[in-house]
Amino acid sequence: MDINKMINRVKNILLTPKSEWPIIADETTTVADIYKSWIIWLAAIPVVVGFIKGSLIGISMPDVPGVISGGTIRVPIVSGIIGAVLSYVLSLVSVYVAALITDALAPTFNGQKNQTQALKAVAYAWTAVWIAGIFQLLPWIGVLVFLVIACYSIYLLYLGLPATMKCPPEKAIGYALLSALCALVLIFVIRFVVGIIGVGVGIGAGALAGSAPAGGMNMVSSTHDGATFDKDSWLGKMEAAGKQMEAAQESGDADAQGKAMQAMMGAALGGGDQVESLAPDALKPFVPETLAGFKRANFSAERNGALGMQMSTASADYNDGGNRALRLEISDTGSMKGLMGLAGWAQTEKETEHGYERTHKQGGRLVHEEWDNESKHGKYGIVLGDRFLVEVSGDANSMEELKTAAASLDLAGLEALKNQGVKKN
């Protein structure tokens, strides 16, 4: 494997896909070569990150006296490895199955059947999904960010199908969406299989990111030459930055290429700022001694870096001296700050027999709620300044109690720090 060639291909397919797809389509290769030089490496990213999250970093749990001791729960290393291997193998299989589906659909959209070209289309289009798998390191919002970025894989597929499968450009939109829908079904199949086997590894959307892209495209209109996006949307900005990059490459001007690269990365990150997350001591004032009448039992704060990203977290457990407990978690997403605004695209709502789960906008802020009427347990999370994640979880009489507990925090003071440590590019 030529690592430099792979890095350049990743950069080109993500940043200048319109000019890269014809090159990919004209390459003489085999299914085995595509796997060896591309799929087996990139599909491993979300799986490895999932293992790091589940077995090395762990998942924080509240302290519920008589039920569970608070702290960090980690999947045993052996179970984590087994789960990661299973997820990885199924992801590799799903890429090939998705390619077979894409190939079978070709005649429906006036394209030409070719299994190798179909595998190219799927493998390179899913690059954004595989890269997005790193965001499972974030709390609940990481799934939302993943879903939004995964939409870009549909856009990549839309651009690539005319070159690889020779379908008319005006047919590419429906072709890409139907292929993506079929791939989405693969996600549920894989999760079902993993669930039956019962491997104890926390495989979320990110860990199965190699399985399929998901989400919508926010498409406004289309022409025979391609799609037109809302210029103020993320995809619209990506499209504009991509055109700037292509123009810079054609000019041969190194300075213009550098500026175009900065513009592209800025669009991709939702702002492009360099951010140093807050020091642990800076988060401590926002973790009070008491919360909703519950007394603080412990406290921890730390700043960590992973995969080139920096994050700071602070957490504390509170109890009422009896069997009720609350947990407060505050996260500074640091260098991933720019992507928090993208999560607002992925608002969801789910009702169950015993409760509900929803993510929505409230007062300009993204809010996440989970509530179980039987256990009287819930979670209330809020995003501040497109940077800070605050979550209160635990036992309460109602969701309103958790909201009140969150409102008692110095949310405005924390939000006021949204530009601290930010360096403009």
Image (cartoon, rainbow, N blue to C red):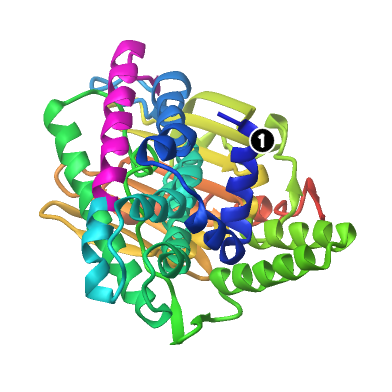
Q: Position of residue 25 (x, y in %)?
A: 48, 58
At 76% from the left and 48% from the top, the residue drawn is: 274
At 66% from the left and 74% from the top, the residue drawn is: 240
Visible residue check, residue 384: no
Where residue 44 sits, quadrant-wise, is top left
Where residue 245 sits, quadrant-wise, is bottom right
Residue numbers of the magenta segment:
71-99
Return the residue nearer the eye: 137 or 102. 102
Q: Secondary structure at mark 1?
A: helix
Asked if residue 94 lies left or right of residue 268, the reply is: left
Which secondary structure type mostly characterizes the magenta part of the structure? Answer: helix
The residue that label 1 is drawn on is: 4
Question: Where, quadrant-wise, is the C terminus in this rendering?
Answer: bottom right
The relative height of residue 299 versus residue 225 in the rendered view (above or below) is above
Asked if residue 211 lies left or right of residue 313, the reply is: left
Where residue 111 sits, quadrant-wise, is bottom left
Asked if residue 23 lies left or right of residue 100, the reply is: right
Q: Position of residue 227 (x, y in %)?
A: 48, 80
Residue type, numbered disc 1: Asn
Q: Is residue 207 magenta?
A: no
Asked if residue 355 lies left or right of residue 35, the reply is: left
At 32% from the left and 36% from the top, the residue drawn is: 92
Q: Position of residue 185 (x, y in %)?
A: 20, 54
Return the residue nearer the eye: 408 or 182. 182
Q: Is residue 83 magenta?
A: yes
Q: Position of residue 149 (x, y in %)?
A: 48, 56
Count the labels in the image: 1
